[in-house]
C-alpha cells in the first residue's frame, strides 16, 4: 500500500507537549484508565529515573525513589526499563530488560556483560501503587533474548513480548512464571536486511558500517484481548494472530504460521498500540509521523511534525488522547560517528485521536 495515499484525518490533530524532560531519554509510555501518564527511561547517562509518573508536567519517580537506585539488590530497583504497559485491569507492568550486547539491537556494553542479559517483569497495582509480583524468566535463553515490548492479556493470564534477539514472540504464563518462544526466525518476525533506515540522506549505520536492523519489535494487543499485532522495524507489513492460538501450547510454529494474517503494508514503523475502537496506531521516524490502521483496513494519517524524532512508545487515554515518546534513537552518538546529535530537550507529546 502506498502510504502517500493514506487518508488524512481532518486537519490532523494538534500536537501538545505533555512533559519536557531535558536530557532524560523517554522510551516507554503508557496511560491508565484514569489518565495517569507513565514514562520510562533506559539506563543512559545522565540517568535520573527508570520509571516516572508525569504529574503537572513534571517527573515523579514511580513508585518511589528506592526503585530508581543503581546499587544493591536488583530485585528492588530498575536495571534498564525497556517498556511499560497498563492493562485493562489497571495493573502497571514494567519490563526491565538489559540484553547481552550481542543480542541487543543497539550493541555496546563491555566484555564482562557479553554472556547473559538481565530480565524481569514487575507488576504494580495502580489502585494501591504497591508491588504485586516479579517474574524473573528463569527458563528464558538469556544469552540470546532481547525482550523489547510487553502486552498483557488479562483474560488468559498471559504476557506477550517481542524478542528481536530471538526473532520471535515470548509468551509468559502469569500463573506459573514459565515461558515459551514461538515463531522464532520466521519470515513474519525477521528483519528485512534490504531495508536500511536513512535520514536526511544519511544511512543509519554504526562505527563499523553495520546498518541498524531490528527483528520483531513493535507489538499491540486489542482491548478485547482477541488479536495480537506485531512486526519488525525493518519490515513493511503489519501482521496479526488471534491470541487463542498463542495460548494453545499444543500448536507448533508450523501450525501458528497458518494462523497469521497480513493486516496492511504500513512501511517502516516502531511502536504500536491499540485503542478501544480497534484502531492500531503506528509510529514512523522516516517521515516524522503517526498513522493508524482502522478495523476496516484504512490507513489514516494522525499527525506529521518535524518534532517527531523517532516517535516510539504509545498509550491511549480514556480522555481520547494518544500519548507518545520521541526517543531520537537515530541521533545518538553510536549512529553518528560518536557525535551526539540529539535535539534537547527530550519531550513526550499527546494528540487528540478519539
Image (cartoon, grey):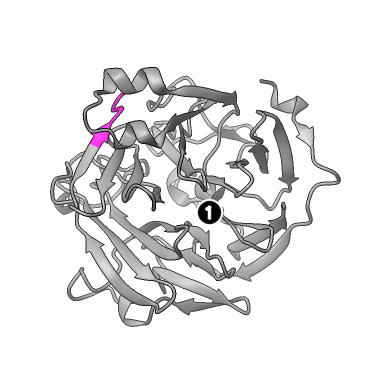
| Residue 88 part of the magenta segment | no
Question: Where residue 267 appears, x then y in whole percent?
Answer: 59, 28
Q: What residue is rendered at 24% in x and 35% in y?
A: 181
In the depicted view, which residue is nearer to us: 253 or 272?
A: 253
| Label 1: how many Cα within 10 Å (few below 14, some 14–19, many 20+) | many
- Residue sitting at the far right: 11
In the depicted view, which residue is nearer to us: 304 or 128?
A: 128
In the depicted view, which residue is nearer to us: 49 or 46?
A: 49
Question: Where residue 238 appears, x then y in whole percent?
Answer: 52, 29
In this picture, is 163 found above or below 64?
above
Residue 56 visible? The answer is: yes
Image quarter (top left, top right, bottom left or bottom right) of the N terminus: top right
- Magenta highlight range: 181-186
Question: Where residue 73 appears, x then y in whole percent?
Answer: 17, 73
Q: What residue is rendered at 62% in x and 76% in y?
A: 57
In this picture, is 247 found above or below 52?
above
Horizontal relation, residue 35 to residue 246: left or right: right
User: Circle 1 — which element?
Assistant: loop
Residue 46 is drawn in which quadrant? bottom left
Q: What residue is rendered at 45% in x and 44% in y?
A: 225
Horizontal relation, residue 336 to residue 159: left or right: right
Name the residue tied to disc 1. Answer: 327
Q: What residue is rendered at 56% in x and 26% in y?
A: 263
Q: How many marks?
A: 1
- Residue sitting at the far bottom: 65
Residue 168 visible? The answer is: no
Predominant secondary structure, magenta span: loop
Question: Where residue 253 appears, x then y in whole percent?
Answer: 27, 23
In this picture, is 56 found above or below 291?
below
Amino acid at each position: 500500500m502506498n502510504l502517500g495515499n493514506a487518508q488524512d484525518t481532518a486537519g490532523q490533530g494538534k500536537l501538545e507537549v505533555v512533559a519536557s524532560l531535558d536530557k532524560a531519554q523517554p522510551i516507554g509510555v503508557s496511560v491508565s484508565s484514569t489518565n495517569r501518564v507513565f514514562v520510562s527511561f533506559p539506563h543512559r547517562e545522565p540517568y535520573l529515573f527508570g520509571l516516572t509518573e508525569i504529574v503537572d508536567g513534571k517527573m515523579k519517580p514511580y513508585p518511589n525513589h528506592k526503585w530508581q537506585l543503581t546499587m544493591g539488590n536488583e530485585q528492588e530497583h530498575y536495571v534498564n526499563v525497556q517498556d511499560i504497559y497498563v492493562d485493562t485491569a489497571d495493573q502497571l507492568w514494567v519490563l526491565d530488560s538489559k540484553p547481552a550486547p550481542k543480542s541487543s539491537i543497539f550493541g555496546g556494553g563491555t566484555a564482562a556483560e557479553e554472556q547473559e542479559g538481565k530480565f524481569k517483569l514487575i507488576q504494580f497495582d495502580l489502585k494501591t501503587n504497591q508491588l504485586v509480583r516479579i517474574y524473573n524468566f528463569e527458563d528464558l535463553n538469556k544469552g540470546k533474548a532481547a525482550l523489547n515490548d510487553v502486552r498483557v492479556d488479562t483474560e488468559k493470564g498471559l504476557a506477550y513480548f517481542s524478542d528481536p534477539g530471538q526473532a520471535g514472540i515470548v509468551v509468559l504464563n502469569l500463573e506459573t512464571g514459565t515461558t515459551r518462544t514461538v515463531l522464532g526466525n520466521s519470515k513474519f518476525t525477521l528483519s528485512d536486511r534490504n531495508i536500511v533506515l536513512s535520514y536526511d540522506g544519511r544511512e543509519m549505520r554504526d562505527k563499523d558500517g553495520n546498518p541498524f536492523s531490528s527483528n520483531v519489535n513493535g507489538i499491540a494487543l486489542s482491548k478485547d484481548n482477541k488479536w495480537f499485532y506485531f512486526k519488525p522495524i525493518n519490515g513493511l507489513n503489519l501482521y496479526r494472530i488471534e491470541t487463542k492460538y498463542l495460548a494453545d501450547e499444543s500448536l507448533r510454529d508450523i501450525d501458528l504460521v497458518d494462523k497469521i494474517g497480513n493486516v496492511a503494508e504500513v512501511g517502516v514503523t516502531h511502536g504500536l498500540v491499540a485503542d478501544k475502537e480497534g484502531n492500531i496506531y503506528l509510529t514512523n521516524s522516516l517521515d516524522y509521523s503517526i498513522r493508524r490502521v482502522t478495523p476496516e483496513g484504512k490507513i489514516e494519517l494522525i499527525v506529521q511534525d518535524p518534532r517527531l524524532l523517532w516517535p516510539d512508545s504509545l498509550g491511549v487515554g480514556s480522555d481520547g488522547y494518544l500519548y507518545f515518546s520521541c526517543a531520537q534513537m537515530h541521533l545518538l552518538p553510536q549512529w553518528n560517528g560518536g557525535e551526539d546529535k540529539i535535539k534537547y530537550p527530550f519531550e513526550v507529546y499527546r494528540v487528540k485521536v478519539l
